[in-house]
Image (spheres, rainbow, N blue to C red):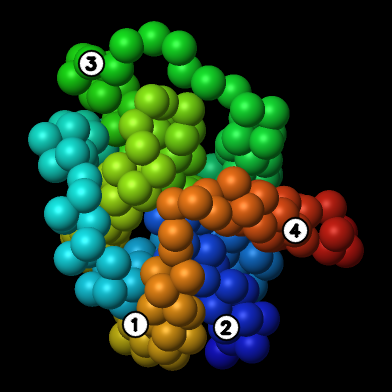
Amino acid sequence: MPGLGWLSVTIAIAGLVRGFTGFGTALIVVPVAGIFLAPHEVIVVIALTGIASTFVLLPRAFRQADSADVSVLILAALVMAPLGFWLMARLDDVLVRWCVAIVAGGTLLALVTGWRYAGRVTRNKLVPVGGAAGIIGGMTGLTGPAVILFYLTGQATAQTIRANTILFLAGLDVVLLANLFFRDLVTGALIFYAALLAVPYFITSLIGQALFHPDYERSYRALAYSVIALAVVTGLPVWEPA
């Protein structure tokens, strides 16, 4: 299976990061997975492996999240995800990888520079955020950037931010998988591939959750940003021979 060793290490690191921050899996895994897999295969694998950590992280997330806001985000993503898949099917694979690099790199830049959303968050503003997440997720597999930026630049506590992102990303994984099954893009080989990757992801998600403590939020984020930056640079198509 192409890139199984590299992706096993990558997703193990991503599980650790997601366990103690609530985000980062797609930003870390998708750029690297694009080296070995086609865009739709990347989305299948990232969504299926996400199920592994979901069972570990959801119980606590349900208790701490704002479920009403997350529901609005998921519904908006559900409506707009098909547009993302439509774009993916019509773009060249290398162009999709450049889109991944631009979205992931732009998200990282906004986080590192401390960009903050200063306005009041209303339900109406949640709709375009969720819709953007659905489009970007369907096109590239990057399920979190729009919502990560929205919550990480908002005024909620670290625990609520973490819980909201976990809950939303779990719901969006379901949305993406439903679209993929409908399009007959989920094969037995991809399911087996994802199952192998789910093992290290499950284990490191447990470890990351055990390590999480609100007092060390800044340290967690600094580590997550460093790992994301390495993944984005590694996944750039420019490194491959023409």
Viewer can see residue 142: yes
Q: What residue sits 69% from the left and 28% below the top?
A: 113
In this rendering, the label closer to the viewer, 1 or 4: 4
Around disc 3, counting alpha carbons within 10 Å, would you say few (fewer than 14), some (14 to 19), or many (20 or more)? few
Q: CA distance from mark 1 to mark 4?
A: 27 Å
Which of the numbered marks, if any, corresponds to residue 8? 2
In primary-sequence order, the first of circles 2 and 4 is 2
Looking at numbered disc 4 in the image, what kind of residue is underneath it? Leu
In this rendering, the label closer to the viewer, 3 or 2: 3
Splitting the image into 4 quarters, where does residue 195 fall? bottom left
Around disc 1, counting alpha carbons within 10 Å, would you say few (fewer than 14), some (14 to 19), or many (20 or more)? some
Residue 57 location in percent, x, y?
29, 67
Q: Which residue is mark 3?
A: 122
Looking at numbered disc 1 in the image, what kind of residue is underneath it? Ile
In primary-sequence order, the first of circles 2 and 1 is 2
Q: Which residue is mark 4?
A: 230
In this rendering, the label closer to the viewer, 3 or 1: 3
Q: Which residue is mark 1?
A: 191
Splitting the image into 4 quarters, where does residue 98 fall? top right
Q: CA distance from mark 3 to mark 1?
A: 39 Å
Q: CA distance from mark 2 to mark 4?
A: 16 Å
In this rendering, the label closer to the viewer, 2 or 1: 2
In the image, farthest residue toward the front: 215
Q: CA distance from mark 2 to mark 1?
A: 15 Å
Q: Is residue 6 above or below residue 172?
A: below
SS category of the residue bearing label 1:
helix
In primary-sequence order, the first of circles 3 and 1 is 3
Looking at numbered disc 2 in the image, what kind of residue is underneath it? Ser
Residue 168 location in percent, x, y?
27, 47
